[in-house]
């Protein structure tokens, strides 16, 4: 699902990963981490897709909420397991969202959608 | 493939979309747009995954390169076709990448990987 985020600025954590051959326990942990993330202060939404590669983008109110989530005890366990078992490679990028635009056939043109389209 | 990006800061365009029932011509155009994007000044890399939803993150040197690519004639045609035919919904977010970290089993711990890990 496309995350419904507030007007920028806010933050995005772009997590890109390539799994190993042994993904045992991964799906369950990923689901649990997503549920847990949703409950954290400052959490705004998450978008996630996986095929050969996975991309998960989570959205946060500010850097403080990202840091707090990174330090969460259960998340720390998951991160460790990811580094040692599940991910052949990963790259995590923390970015400040500065502008955005929504649209599409179901939404109509951005200027009529009520979304926060910005001139560019 | 995970994009190999330089040290931050640089920019990310996070494009999230849900397709319509009629995706005719989409794959071919998407491939062509990716090839074309790679040739643009300021392009740094791209990561893309699609299942029910698609997430494509492209990385750029600065905002000027993003704006120039947005205005590219062939890209304009693709954007129009996307808005009217291929995307039930989409959300595009332009974000400034401020810090990043790479790792994983094939890479070793971030501190030994030669990647630009930053304290957080």
Image: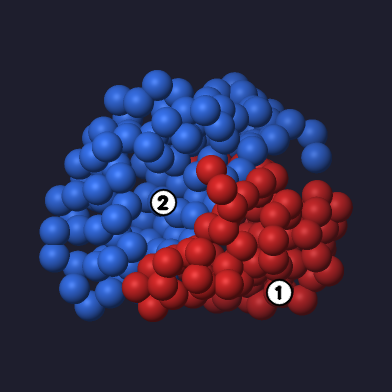
Chain colours: A red, B blue
Q: Dividing the picture into quarters, in which one does residue B10 lie? A: top right
Pointer 1 with pointer 2, Cβ within 8 A: no
In the rendered structure, the answer to whether residue B112 lies left or right of residue B119 reads: left
Which residue corresponds to the image point at 65% horizontal and 28% vertical from the top-left? B9
Q: Is residue B6 above or below residue B108?
A: above
Which residue corresponds to the image point at 61% horizontal and 44% vertical from the top-left? B95
Which residue corresponds to the image point at 58% horizontal and 72% vertical from the top-left? A114
- Whether residue B108 is visible to the viewer of this picture, yes or no, is no
Which chain does the residue under circle 1 lie in?
Answer: A
Helix, strand or loop for disc 2: strand
In the rendered structure, the answer to whether residue B111 lies left or right of residue A82 reads: right
Tell me residue A119's x, y (percent). 56, 48
Which residue corresponds to the image point at 45% horizontal and 23% vertical from the top-left? B42
Which chain does the residue under circle 2 lie in?
Answer: B
Q: Distance between the residues labelled 1 and 2?
A: 23 Å
- Identify which residue, A30 or A56, lies in the foreground: A56
In the rendered structure, the answer to whether residue A40 lies left or right of residue B8 reads: right
Q: Mark 1 points at which residue?
A: A38
Q: Is residue A48 above or below residue B76?
A: below
Q: Mark 2 points at which residue?
A: B56
Q: How crowded is mark 1: few (under 14 residues within 10 Å), some or many (20 or more)?
A: some
Q: Dividing the picture into quarters, in which one does residue B84 lie? A: bottom left
Tell me residue B17's x, y (percent). 40, 64
Q: How crowded is mark 2: few (under 14 residues within 10 Å), some or many (20 or more)?
A: some
């Amino acid at each position: 699902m496309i995350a419904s985020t507030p007007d920028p600025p806010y933050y995005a954590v772009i997590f890109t990963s390539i799994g190993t051959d042994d993904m045992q326990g991964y799906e369950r942990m990923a689901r649990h981490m997503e549920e847990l993330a949703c409950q954290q202060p400052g959490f705004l939404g998450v978008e996630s897709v996986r095929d050969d590669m996975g991309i998960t983008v989570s959205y946060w109110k500010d850097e403080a909420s990202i840091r707090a989530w990174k330090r969460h005890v259960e998340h720390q366990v998951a991160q460790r397991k990811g580094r040692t078992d599940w991910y052949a490679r990963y790259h995590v990028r923390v970015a400040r969202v500065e502008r955005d635009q929504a649209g599409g056939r179901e939404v109509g043109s951005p200027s009529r959608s009520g979304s926060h389209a910005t001139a560019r």
